[in-house]
Amino acid sequence: MSETKETTRCGFVAILGAPNAGKSTLMNHLLGIKLAAVSPKAQTTRSRIRGVLTEGTGQIIFIDTPGIFKPNKRLDRAMVRAAWHEEQDADIRLLIMDVSRGKIDPHTLPIIEQIREHKTPRVWLLLNKIDKIDRQKLLPLAAECEALGIFENILMIAAKMDDGLADLKNKLLAAIPEGPWHYPEDQLTDLSERLIAAELTREQLYHKLGAELPYASTVVTDAWETFRDGSVKISQTVLVERIQQKAIVVGAKGQKIKDIREAAQAEITELLGKPVHLFLFVKVAERWQEDPEHYENWGLEFKS
């Protein structure tokens, strides 16, 4: 008697939300690996990042999207456009909302209105940062959200603490459609190592510079060389728009860029599992946001 092959499941799950709601933290913790830059600064995620979770007979392709907000500049418009585009192609949409204020987040309200207006199917609401709210306020807030009548599921999580994520993952694995896997079992993302390395360095720019960091900056991986001993030499350029911004990134006697390099090198080393020698350069490029190549690398449309 021949063995019956188990039915596989595979689905795309888009993670939506306002800037700084915890989208990248959620995906990183679900996958157990850092793919997306995380910082307290809003609008950290720029690119469309796909993370692949394969467990048992199921495979979930998570899509971490840029935060949805009112765009002004070209880059802002491209980021918001990408977020809504990914939402349209997903099997399930996770709308993540910061509930630390004890009420419906005002930055999430426009997204809720869009979902209601377009009758978007299969939206799950994730009430995030429940560790920062009094539980007596949490249940009435959940009831208020349920009364909207537009969410298939409402789950409570604290992504940074891994609270509620196992339940979320199991529910998603059961809810995605039957079908063949899109990626090999051991593949975690469709991003190149070069782009992930640039994201990790950009994250350290935020951590080390905080409010000093100009939003108008980015990191590009210029060169990647692997040696016989397995170690890697990576050269990256930090692009800023003004000479004054370059001075901020470099710091007095080059100390800031040294701190950024050391922290980013440690993160990339952990990701790759091999010794990394990182070299950083800072360059003024006044119109880098008008360069279509950056948008192509991030999976964004230049003409937005």
Image (spheres, rainbow, N blue to C red):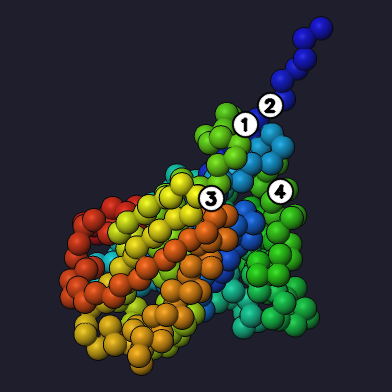
Could you tell me how far apart the alpha carbons at marks 3 and 1 are, in whole angstroms? 19 Å
For the residue marked with disc 1, what is the amino acid? Glu
Secondary structure beneath disc 2?
loop
Name, please, the residue furthest toward the top: 1
Residue 119 to residue 261: above or below: above
Could you tell me how far apart the alpha carbons at marks 3 and 2 are, in whole angstroms? 22 Å
First-in-chain label (3 vs 2): 2
Secondary structure beneath disc 3?
strand
Q: Position of residue 109 (x, y in %)?
A: 50, 71
Which quadrant: the N terminus? top right
Residue displayed at 34% across by 63% down: 235
Q: What residue does disc 1 label? A: 178
Q: Nearer the viewer, mark 3 or mark 2?
A: 3
Q: What residue does disc 3 label? A: 51
Q: What residue does disc 2 label? A: 7
Circle 3 residues within 10 Å: few <14, some 14–19, many ≥20: many
Q: Position of residue 193 (x, y in %)?
A: 44, 52
- Does residue 121 appear in the picture of this structure? no
